Amino acid sequence: MKRYKQWEFIAILALLSLALQSCLGSTDSSYKSVVKSKNGNDVKINVDQALFKGKIYFTLDHNLYVLNGNDKENPKQLTSGLTVSDPAISPNGKWIAFIIRHTNYSDLAYMPANGGKYTILADGNGTFTTTQTGGETSTAHWFGQPTWEADNQHIVFLGDNQKAYWSKDQTGGYDSFLLDMQLFRMSMNDRLNTQDKIANAQPVAYTAIGAGGLRDPAIRPGHADEILYTSYKYTQASNWSQLSTQLNLINSNAIGNEMQINQYKYHPGEFGAESNPGVTLTPEKSGLSNLEPSFSPDGNSIVYVRREDTTHMSLNVMPVVNGVTNDTNNPNVDVTSTANQQRGLAGYGKSVKLKTSQYISQPVWSPDGTQLAYYEYNNTTFDLWLATIIKNPKTGAYSIKQDSEVQLTQANGSLDSDSRPAWTP
């Protein structure tokens, strides 16, 4: 039997190690400790292999950080002493809007993109009062997931602003606080600091009551009036376990314009009673969950997450269907017609699956459209990952470039995967 010398054996081990690295991702030597978590653990960045251009904003222990692709060894902390989530950068790069969470409410705030003093735009603080019948009423509010419009002045956000606004006659008999989040719009020059101002903020999209409300608003690049969002709704009135999670596209001014003619034409409501001018981009099917969409920089494609089953999620891309919202170029389109709703689903049939994993969340495109960032669950924790995305010049279909997926962070459980990241030039 042939006997190997010691150096030959070492060489074989080295080659085996390299092979394993290519299969399992980056090694610990690729990472550098850049900050300590609140628990004293090292938070590391892959400084050698995770290459990207621009700046990525994220929250760590609910403190806001920005990581520059040209200086990954020195992430800048922008907030402290606050519980921050969902940073959103204005298109001109000057401002950050974000959410400050408290025990029983949250605030919508903004500050300069490089950090500094923050200003509260929507104040959710309120009081709890016990009624004569033993129930409780609350003037506190929850806000979430802001996104900037193209004018750098207006912000679309989630809120329970109108939880006490609608009567049961308008909502199909629902006679309690409407706690499901809906979409609203405000100027950064306004302040929602009274109950009247909060309740009368401009509505953008209404919800079906009781299923979870709306999530994930995103402004479509190149189409300033179109907003993408996720909706949760039941598909059967008698079986509340039948939940459908869909992507929707809406004109941000549709409800506001209609209110000048018929104030209550559109409204939230219980199963089958809601009226909303949004167009569904994914099918309404019990158990089908499509969520967390993000537009490509040119506004023509959407990357999103699909829940495949209880232990698998996938990352997908589909094209955006044009001309299905009632914008100025299509003033006569009936967005609620069956024909238009079917047109809205045309892009879903061209959807392409990029990858499947146990848990994936919050994908976002790079400003130049060549990469994706997303949270992925591995070894019991979430971390930020990067992948290069390529487009077939003949078919237009997207795919992830082979061997381009790379782990950016090694945060040991301190990264907030429920908080949307942001990527700017």
Image (tube, grey):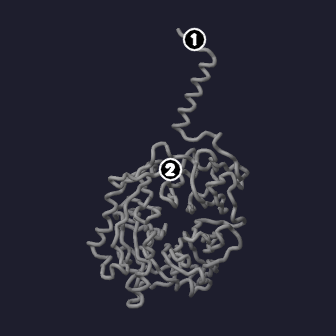
The residue carrying pointer 1 sits among few (fewer than 14), some (14 to 19) or many (20 or more) residues within 10 Å by Cα, namely few
Q: Nearer the viewer, residue 344 or 400?
A: 400
Q: Quadrant of residue 269?
A: bottom left
**Residue 205 in view in this figure:** no
State the residue at coordinates (60%, 20%). Answer: 9
State the residue at coordinates (49%, 50%). Answer: 388
- The residue labelled by disc 1 is 3
Residue farthest to the front, as pictured: 393
State the residue at coordinates (56%, 36%). Answer: 21
Instruction: Please say if the residues under marks 2 and 1 sit with CB atoms less than 8 Å apart.
Output: no
Q: Nearer the viewer, residue 371 or 265?
A: 371
- The residue labelled by disc 2 is 387
Instruction: Inspect the image, locate mark 2, and give the three-letter code of the amino acid beneath it.
Output: Ala
Marks 2 and 1, how far apart in space? Answer: 43 Å
Which badge, 2 or 1, is on the more N-terminal residue? 1
Q: Is residue 44 above or below residue 154?
A: above
Residue farthest to the top, as pictured: 1
**Residue 12 in view in this figure:** yes
Disc number for residue 43: none
Question: Looking at the picture, how far across and down is residue 304, in whole percent?
Answer: 44, 59
Q: Is residue 54 left or right of residue 344?
A: right
